[in-house]
Each structure stands twice: as C-alpha cells, then as structure tokens.
Image: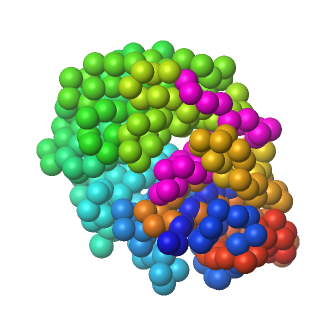
Amino acid sequence: MLSYLFCFFNCYILLFCHIKIQAKEFKLLHILQERSGEVKQLKFSPDGRKIVSASGDKIIRIWDVASRKKIQSCTGHVKSVRSAAFSPDGKTVASCSWDKTIRLWDVQTGIELMKLEGCSSMVLDVSYSQDGRNIVSGLSDSIIILWDVHSGKMVRTLVGHMRGVLSVQYSSDCQMIVSASYDKTIALWNAKSGERLKQLIGHSGTVTCARFSPNNQYVVSCSFDKTIRIWDMKTGRQLKILRGHFGIVNEVKHLPDEQTIVSCSQDKTIRLWNMQSENELAKFEGHTSNSYCVDVSPDGIIAVDKVFISQKNLKRKFYVQVVVKKRNFKFFFEKSL
C-alpha cells in the first residue's frame, strides 16, 4: 500500500510516497512552486487528495496532490496564520491566526464562510472533531476553546495549562482531547464535560506537539528537550522515550500501520521510528534549515517545507516536491539544492 507523508522547512514543501519503510526508496517526481511567506502548518485532506498550508503571509493555500497545482488561496486574516485543518468531509478548512480569530473556508470556492471571534489571545492551533460538529482551538494565554461549527459559538472553555497551548487534537471517537503546552505538560480532557482527566508529566522542555495514535491507545509527543515520548492513554504512564534528534523536535505523527512514527526536528532531519522496538528506521538529512512540520495522508505520503534562497534573485519561494521509491533522500535533497 502506498504511504504518504509531508513535512516542511519554512517555505519549502516536500511530498513523498513510500512502499516500504526504507530511506533508499525515494525518487523525485515533480516540483510546484509559489511565492509564499513562512509556512506554519501543513495538513492533508481526509481523502489524501489535497493539502492545506497555513502561512506567515496571512494566506491559506489549498493544493491538489494529483495535478500538483494550487487550487485556492484564501485571504482574510490580518496577521500570520498559525494552523489550518480540513473538516472530516473535506469540504471546509478551518484556520487560526495571531489575529485572534478562527475562520472557516469553502474548499471549492475559497470563500470565507464564517469568522469565529472572542478569543482572548493568539490562536496557535485548531482541529476538527471527527464528526465535524466541533472545533478545538489552543490559545497563547493557556486557554483551550471548543466551538460549535454550525453556530460559530463557543461551547466551553478548558482551563488547566499554565502557559500557551501549542497543539490540540480530538480523539477519533470524539470523546477526548489531547493538548500540548509551553508549560512542559500534556493534558487529556473529557471533550463533553471539559474535565481534565490526566496530566502527562515527563518532558523537561516545552511540548511542541501531542497526537493520539490511530487506535486511541497511545499518545505520542515531542518537545524542546529533543525527545519523543509514548504514553499509555488509559493510565497516563510514560511507556517509552525515543532519542536521536539533536535539536528541538517540532512535530510527530503515526503512519497508517500504527507501528511507525515520523518526526521532524530543528536538527534539519526527518526520522522514522518503530514504536515497539524504539529503533530509528530511517534518517533523512542533508537539509540546510529546520524542519517544522510533518503530516501523513490516510494511505501513506511525506511532505516538507523549507526556506529556499534562489542564487539568482534571492527571493523566497514555495515548492511542493513529489517523491516516490528508489532514490536516497539525502542524495536527492543535495542534488536539488
């Protein structure tokens, strides 16, 4: 089964596909480019056919994976867009910004459908519930807000973190929320009551990201402390620590096989890990700047964003590169630059 993943290094997006979890099975297929500000976040659509990117230039861009073309540019935010995510049916994108708003966009037309207002500070992350009824947002003042998608009204506020919330996500059954914070902790919440169920403590630095495993049995997290940690969701117990990165780990996510984790780091590498054995399966290196984000499509791709400086005009450019098997990633990357 084909498997897709993407990560980014500022303004440069790389899109990969793999057949097996081996670093030698990558090959360049295509490049798309678009002038852009710094990309803050990238997410696949539920069917894996589109990508949405949130950018520092206040624009949300939507890309078609098959045609490798940008199909929408959504404008309306007045400050940097920090995150964006597709609705479960893939018809709407939610974005959040330093302008303290969340906005909903029609994927087909790029038109703004709704603006959610009332946040007390910058909104750092946003995510849909799997049933599409609610949105959860994490704010820079430590607050988490749940929203009703249809009315645009706040449903409840979750209070418990001591500092800004960098990452929020619903479990696939919509019963729980996981959050990661500058306060070095991860929290598990009851999505209906708003009660904090567990506080996961172990990281020695800011927790940049926390994600449920596809089967909702585990939480995987990463941190300024350069580690990836795996937690038992029922007990809150820390099960494993994955070490190998030499810089801040910015994001982690499970691949569809539920046994493999992909991570990206400010040490300029992307790494694949076996969750059970704790072994590093592959390390993609040779990049010239930090890797900020990674996501995985339902049936498999890998994508990367980075700052690219053209020697000719020294302008920042935005690329999407599609990669498939049988080319060492490091060689490909060095050859491309």
Rendered image quadrant of residue 96 = top left
Q: What's the coloring here?
A: rainbow
Count of picture labels: 0
Task: Return the residue nearer the eye: 81 or 224.
Answer: 224
The residue stretch that appears in magenta: 238-265
Please name the residue shown 48% across and 76% down the image: 65
Q: Is residue 245 magenta?
A: yes
Please name the residue shown 58% across and 48% down the image: 261
Q: Quadrant of the C terminus?
A: bottom right
In the rendered view, tell whether residue 175 sits above or below residue 200. Answer: below
Task: Return the residue nearer the eye: 199 or 74.
Answer: 199
Where does the image place residue 24, in percent across and percent down from the top left? 76, 70
Q: Is residue 259 magenta?
A: yes
Side of 169 where 273 appears, left or right: right
Where does the image place residue 224, in percent across and percent down from the top left? 68, 30
In the rendered view, tell whether residue 262 sits above or below residue 246. Answer: below
Side of 121 where 326 appears, left or right: right
In the rendered view, tell whether residue 23 sits above or below residue 253. Answer: below
Residue at the far left in the pictured view: 151
- Asked whether residue 165 is in view, the answer is no
Where does the image place residue 205, in percent across and percent down from the top left? 65, 23
Rendered image quadrant of residue 8 = bottom right
Side of 199 where 307 appears, left or right: right
Rendered image quadrant of residue 31 = bottom right
Residue at the far front in the pictured view: 277
